[in-house]
Amino acid sequence: MEIRSESVGLRSEKLGGSSPVIPRKRLQVWFIRVCSSILVWTCLVQLVAVGELWHPRFITNLTTRFSQIAGPLHVQVAVQPPPPLPPPRNYTSNGFLKVSCNGGLNQMRSAICDMVAVARLLNLTLVVPELDKTSFWADPSDFEDIFDVRHFIDSLRDEILPLFNKSKVLHFNRTDARLANNMIPLELQKLRCRVNFQALKFTPQIESLGHKLVHILHQRGPFMALHLRYEMDMLAFSGCTHGCKQEEAEELKRLRYAYPWWREKEINSVERRSQGLCPLTPEEAALVLQALGIDKETQIYVAAGEIYGSERRLAALRAAFPRIVRKETLLDPLELQQFQNHSSQMAALDFMVSVASNTFVPTYDGNMAKVVEGHRRYLGFKKTILLDRRKLVELLNLHQNGTLPWNEFTVAVREAHEKRMGQPIRRRVIPDKPKEEDYFYSNPQECLCEANNCDDLLGRGNSNSSSVP
């Protein structure tokens, strides 16, 4: 090599000027390196393809290591690894439990957790639950379209044995008659939590897009998730028509009558609202958020389906908080296409964003609001503003009729919610009125602390009682 270098150097001197040979040789070396790299990666790809047939786990680990060395090709969200699976429990099954859930995503989610507890209590083998396809949303999704079936089965293998068999079963065809919130053995309460917080994992497609939404939002700064439950089904079935035009109120009433299973038909909207049983309107939500001191430039993610009245009803909220976004505005339409006409899958995306938000504000205490609240408590009591709608309606009426000035309105709103920010608190128990007490999944206190420090965390002075927190 040294002799060749010398001869090349002499030759270039004779020609005069700089030698064109040297750059060409460097180009050749570079070309060889590129070709070698392509060849190596091609061989690796072939190895992966063939190795899938031989030993998938080995190849997966291998490609993971290469990805770590080469650097990420796309944004990845750090997710804590799931806890190790316990050894399978030896028991004799008494039979099968078949469950047909009803309601929206979060109502079905809670019901599945309850049914796992029932299966454990009765020593039954749980058949993978069937989801509701006949409700208002007419969502055709099956369990495996929303939740990771294999993860669900593996996570609960020591408690139950979910199967697809459909013979010799006890069938619960509606699951809205739920388990009690309190006076249940600790092991069953913890099992309900285990199903809710660990076993019910969304499909990889939902998880991936949900994480992308959260990443986009965090890149833009802190954000609030506003669960604006001002949707057609909620207004129709609750009978809440405050702020609606006359023709809209009639449309909502017709929808309520169109569903025979809905028992209440004639509903007094004014009375229902005064009792705090209506979701806040978008206009009311704007006033309340302003009164709570939320900055105008706060990024607000509207976690909801189609708002009744569309953009016309969002005008006041958007004027007060211009940085309002939705999944439809943050993602490419093609990314959402696979979830269109599947309301539960779309709701799963909103659920993920709501759990991950810096602040969560539900305008109605429905199933999603309660389940998200419980998840945020489980994740370290993340800030959740639990609106006292009964008190707010009183204050809003006084302010809007000119009786209560803005400065007094803001003081009253803040005082009313000082202790409603998702802080640790004991679940309320109302003897003989289980439907009026606090919901287990909104405050699963048995799963939030160990027995020896639960009193310190939840407050010794705040014992179970019928008082409103």
Image (tube, grey):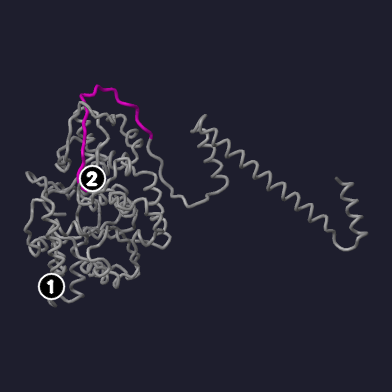
**For this rendering, which residue is in front, 371 or 456?**
371
Which residue position is annotated with label 2? 133
Mark-to-mark CA distance, 1 and 2: 43 Å
Q: For the point 33% across and 35% down, which residue is it?
A: 155
Q: For the point 52% across and 49% down, which residue is it?
A: 72
Residue 170 location in percent, x, y?
17, 30
Quarter of the C terminus within the rendering: bottom left
Judge left or right: residue 433 versus residue 328.
left
Q: Quadrant of residue 310?
A: bottom left
Q: For the point 20% across and 51% down, which residue is it?
A: 136
Judge left or right: residue 197 versus residue 434.
right
Which residue position is annotated with label 1? 398
- Camera-nearest label, 1 or 2: 2
Secondary structure under badge 2?
loop
Of marks 1 and 2, which one's residue comes earlier in the chain?
A: 2
Task: Tell me which secondary structure the magenta stretch mostly adopts.
Answer: loop
Q: What residue range appears in magenta?
A: 84-103
User: In the picture shown, does residue 244 fall above or below 103?
Assistant: below
Q: Quadrant of residue 13?
A: bottom right
User: In the picture shown, does residue 84 fall above or below 240?
Assistant: above
Is residue 95 shown in magenta? yes
Instruction: Check disc 1: other Cα within 10 Å, few if <14, some if 14-19, many if 20+.
Output: some
Q: Amino acid at mark 2?
A: Lys
Q: Amino acid at mark 1?
A: Leu
Residue 90 location in percent, x, y?
29, 22
Quarter of the N terminus within the rendering: top right
